[in-house]
Image (cartoon, grey):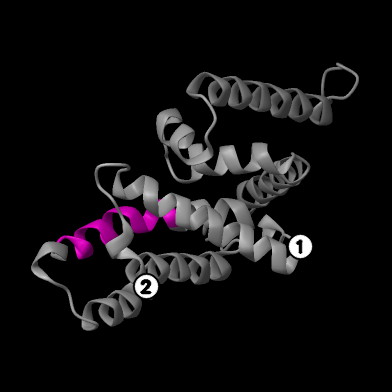
Amino acid sequence: MNAHAPVLKWLVSLGVSAGEADWEALYRQELPRIYNFFRYRTGDSALAEDLTSITFEKAWRARHQHRRDLAAFSTWLFAIARNVAIDHFRRRRVELPIEELDEAPAPDDIEADTHRRLQFRRLSRLLAELPDRERELLALKYGSGCTNREIAGLTGMSESNIGTILYRTLQRLRTQWDQEGNPHGRPIPV
């Protein structure tokens, strides 16, 4: 996340009025959530950093348009992030594999690290097979830590609908996970 420090310095160097003195605090608070949203959506740390920077730059340039009486800053910022993601995927039409995430290997246990990587790839493949809406909801919920209420504000869906979709999506993922791990219900040989 330190890679974003130059962006923050550049934005602040453009001049901050007294009414915007909390920009740095808002940036530091929301940066991990926005970054994780993009990391879940793209599966690429470097791309997630780039899209996060674009989001904050757009937010900075449009900061006078944010109306606190209509939406919290985080809701407004996530709306910008969602649009940045839509623009990115519209241009690319390709999602990068989540396997490309930088992972620190377990120094003492290569077998456990290999198993963890295989499990991660398996989960990544299952996530990639989900419809875009479900992947986005999972990214907002688990990547960014948004509440169902925040997601509802971003998507225009009801909180209960979001909860239902997330529940069903997770159930489907669990079922697929179990079926792949043990397709015939037989005990796994040791």
Is there any visible trace of residue 43 in the rendered image? no
Query: Residue flagged by tag 2: what amino acid is it?
Result: His
Query: In the orientation shown, which residue stands out farthest toward the left?
Result: 18
Q: Report helix, strand or loop for mark 1.
A: loop
Residue to which mark 2 is pinned: 4
Q: Which mark is residue 94?
A: 1
- Give coordinates of residue 56: x percent, y percent: 39, 66
Please state, as top left, top right, bottom left or bottom right, where the N terminus lies in the image: bottom left
Residue sitting at x 62%, y 46%: 112
Is there any visible trace of residue 148 in the rendered image? yes
Res 32 quadrant in image: bottom left
Whether residue 112 sits left or right of residue 189 in the image: it is left
**Numbered circles on residues, count:** 2
Whether residue 176 sits left or right of residue 56 in the image: it is right
* Residue 107 drawn in magenta: no
The Cα atoms of the two marked residues, 1 and 2, are separated by 25 Å
Query: Residue flagged by tag 1: what amino acid is it?
Result: Val
Q: Is residue 145 above or below residue 14?
A: above
Q: Report helix, strand or loop for mark 2.
A: helix
Q: Main secondary structure of the magenta part?
A: helix
**Closer mark to the observer between disc 1 and disc 2:** 1
- Give coordinates of residue 134: x percent, y percent: 66, 36
Q: Is residue 136 above or below residue 176?
A: below
Please give the range of residues in magenta: 22-34
Please state, as top left, top right, bottom left or bottom right, where the C terminus lies in the image: top right
Residue sitting at x 22%, y 83%: 13
Res 5 quadrant in image: bottom left
